[in-house]
């Protein structure tokens, strides 16, 4: 059951306004530089989805985004702080062919997960998030394969060279299972323990 205060206690206005302003700056720039397919990254989906999550407020949306990206955001941060030596997921942050101000916009990988954690701390974790995020991933992965340029390999829906060739449905199914088992289920278990439904 949703905790009573979660429907009546808004997120502070300065948080909602500053986060929304950040997203409104990032989205048109990314559209121009990277194209609309860039919005299919799970991190970009979370960036956008957290706007309604903060304004409604919706612990379900925030919890879904937590399940989807918080673990991966930690990996991104580790890659960033180690200059790509530990993980290469943030390598583009050190690509001098991209303007430094454009790379700077990707620092949203810090306030966005902070907003997710804040929402789950304040309102609690919604355990329905696992089911709904798994369903969302089942839509996003094939959509990415269909709509995004292969060379960008958004959401890793194209196999690396060392993976044997396989039909797209098999690869996408394997990727979905990997996300659910390695990312979503452990995140779900941790969030249920760390962020009880009653919030703070």
Image (cartoon, rainbow, N blue to C red):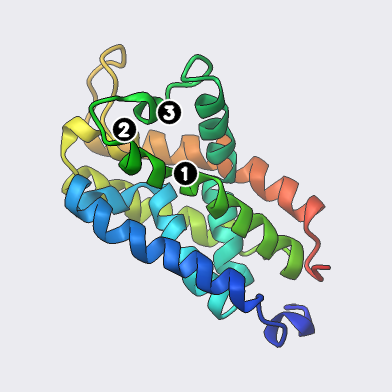
Q: Residue at x 68, y 85 (%)?
A: 7
Q: Residues within 10 Å of mark 2 (few under 14, many from 20)?
A: some
**Helix, strand or loop for disc 2:** helix
Residue position marked by numbered label 1 in the rendering: 107
Circle nearer the N terminus (3, 2): 3
* Residue closest to the eye, 45 or 29: 29
Residue position marked by numbered label 3 in the rendering: 89
Image location of residue 42, percent across then percent down: 41, 49
Image location of residue 23, percent across then percent down: 40, 62
Q: CA distance from mark 1 to mark 3?
A: 13 Å
Residue 181: tell me if it is visible: no
**Helix, strand or loop for disc 1:** helix
Is 53 displayed left or right of 127 in the figure? Answer: left
Q: Residue furthest top?
A: 162
Q: Residue furthest bottom?
A: 8
Residue position marked by numbered label 2 in the rendering: 171
Q: Are marks 1 and 2 in contact (CB under 8 Å)?
A: no
Q: Residues within 10 Å of mark 3 (few under 14, many from 20)?
A: some
Q: Nearer the viewer, mark 1 or mark 3?
A: 1
Is 103 displayed left or right of 135 in the figure? Answer: left
Q: Residue at x 79, y 68 (%)?
A: 199
* Residue closest to the eye, 35 or 83: 83
In the rendered image, the vertical position of residue 31 relative to residue 95, given as above or below = below
In the rendered image, the vertical position of residue 88 relative to residue 38, given as above or below = above
Image location of residue 110, percent across then percent down: 55, 46
Circle nearer the N terminus (1, 3): 3
Image quadrant where residue 160 sits = top left
Circle nearer the N terminus (1, 2): 1
Is 159 displayed left or right of 42 in the figure? Answer: left
């Amino acid at each position: 059951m949703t905790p009573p205060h979660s429907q009546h206690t808004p997120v502070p206005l300065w948080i909602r306004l500053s986060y929304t302003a950040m997203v409104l700056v990032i989205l048109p720039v990314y559209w121009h530089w990277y194209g609309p397919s860039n919005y299919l990254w799970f991190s970009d989906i979370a960036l956008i989805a957290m706007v309604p999550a903060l304004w409604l407020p919706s612990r379900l949306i925030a919890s879904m985004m937590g399940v989807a990206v918080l673990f991966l955001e930690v990996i991104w941060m580790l890659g960033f702080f180690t200059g790509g030596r530990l993980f290469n997921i943030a390598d583009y942050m050190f690509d001098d062919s991209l303007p430094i101000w454009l790379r700077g916009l990707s620092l949203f990988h810090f306030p966005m997960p902070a907003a997710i954690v804040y929402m789950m701390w304040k309102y609690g974790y919604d355990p329905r998030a696992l089911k709904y995020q798994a369903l969302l991933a089942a839509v996003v992965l094939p959509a990415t394969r269909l709509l995004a340029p292969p060379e960008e390999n958004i959401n890793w829906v194209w196999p690396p060279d060392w993976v044997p060739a396989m039909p797209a449905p098999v690869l996408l199914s394997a990727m979905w299972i990997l996300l659910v088992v390695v990312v979503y289920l452990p995140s779900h278990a941790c969030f249920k323990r760390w962020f009880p439904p009653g919030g703070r």
